[in-house]
Amino acid sequence: LSTWSAVPAGPPDPILGITEAFKADKDSRKINLGVGAYRDENGKPYVLNAVKKAEEKMASAKLDKEYLPITGLGSFTQNAAKLAYGADSAPLNQHAIAVTQSISGTGALRIGGAFVARHYPGSKIIYLPNPTWGNHIPLFKDSGLEVRQYRYFDKKTVGLDFEGLKEDLKNAPEGAVVLLHACAHNPTGVDPTQAQWKEISDLIAEKKLFPFFDMAYQGFASGSTARDAFAVRHFVSQGHQVALCQSFAKNMGLYGERVGAFSLTTTSEEEKKRVESQLKIVVRPMYSNPPLHGAHIASTILSDPELYKQWEGEVKGMADRIISMRERLYELLTNGFQTPGEWGHIKSQIGMFSYTGLNTAQCKTLAEKAHVYMTMDGRISMAGLNGGNVEYFAQSVDAAVR
Ligand code: PLP
């Protein structure tokens, strides 16, 4: 008998399953709208020119491969904090932001979860939006937190359930942690407006909740890194102390390089030093120190004014292409095919993903009859659409809903 004979098979990852089915499909019209990675106008993965240039610069600098410190590359973490909080941020200028490099956004969330579980003095309950990125739930449970959900999405309007959100946060126990998607909510593509963010900020202050931001898409939502950081910067300006997870997977196209940062705002440089010393104690037994190459790429881009400008243009280019696909799809479903139903949300949603409102049966039909693959909750990655396939997709949706 094997030592592991009693280990049950786990369920397959729903998104990887879609990729498998897509790969096995031989039809030339097939479309994969499952993956959360940007694709260019030809449906191909895209390496940013700013990244290529940064790598050339790094190659000619003949860098070594020594270990990074436990909290990562200092020039990277400082620039990452500046990008998120803004150059005029009070805690940034007071040297009061504790920050560590992380294994992309997931690693930032995991460090944050572990730090909160160990050091947060309030209640060890974290409220996640319903729905949320699938990995949030096991990630925070594994961190030792109790996971609860607050209402977020209204199926009827395919929009934000703002009243439900406020009611659930009002009823949360004092001191609970609240996870907020800073922009481009995954999976719905539905974000609060700036006025709604202000209300959420007030409510969180009133109820003494702790705001924990996941910002995996800065720049990817609106095309502007400053605009997408509105929520984080507003909360900080209102005196909130925040936790923040950053990922450079999407906005720099550094998916497999695993570049991210986790930060906490504190009230003084002395406090920051204490908090950072404890972040090190969380990180050290997990993976000792983070990978070098990707952080160096991001740091090179963020610290070189010319590369920074080029990068900003490329982020905007990606966001604009996605926005233009939203407009085109909306046009095709309404004026083009006059598809039954309301499709305004396709245009008003933001970021990589769109909750189409298609039900499971319709999603199945799309996969089986039209070779169009997406998650069964009706979520599509807008980045998978392009000039060559958007019309076929709209036509297939039209056929599936009639
Ligand atoms: N948070 C959200 C909401 C995401 O959608 C993702 C990626 O899809 C992540 C975090 C983490 O991604 P990564 O670990 O690749 O940076």
Image (cartoon, rainbow, N blue to C red):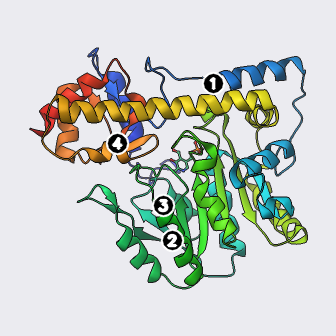
Callout 4: few (<14), some (14-19), or many (20+) C-alpha neighbours within 10 Å?
A: some
* Residue 290, disc: none
Cβ(mark 4) to ligand 1 < 8 Å?
A: no
Question: Which element is circle 1 on?
Answer: loop
Which of pointers 4 and 3 indicates the residue nearer the eye?
4
For label 3, the residue is 137
Answer with mark 2 or mark 3, whichever residue precedes in sequence.
3
Above or below, comparing residue 391 to residue 139 in the picture:
above
Name the amino acid type tagged 1: Leu
2 and 3 marks in contact (CB < 8 Å): no
Q: Within the image, what quadrant is residue 343 found in? A: top left
Indicate which disc, 4 or 2, sits on the residue closer to the N terminus.
2
Side (left or right) of 65 relative to 145:
right
Which quadrant, please, contains the C terminus? top left
* Badge 2 amino acid: Ile
The disc placed on residue 347 is 4
Disc 2: which residue = 200
* Left/right of residue 98 with respect to residue 338 in the rendered view: right
Residue 289 visible in the shown view: no
Between label 2 and label 3, give the one nearer the viewer. Answer: 2
Q: Is residue 66 visible?
A: yes
The x, y position of residue 18, in whole percent, is: 35, 35
Type of amino acid under label 4: Lys
Comparing marks 1 and 3, which lies closer to the viewer? 1
Nearest to N terminus: mark 1 or mark 4:
1
Can you give x and y, in whole percent of width and height, for residue 14 in the image?
37, 43
Q: Quadrant of residue 201?
A: bottom right
Which residue lies under the disc numbered 1? 48
Vertical relation: 194 (above or below) 295: below
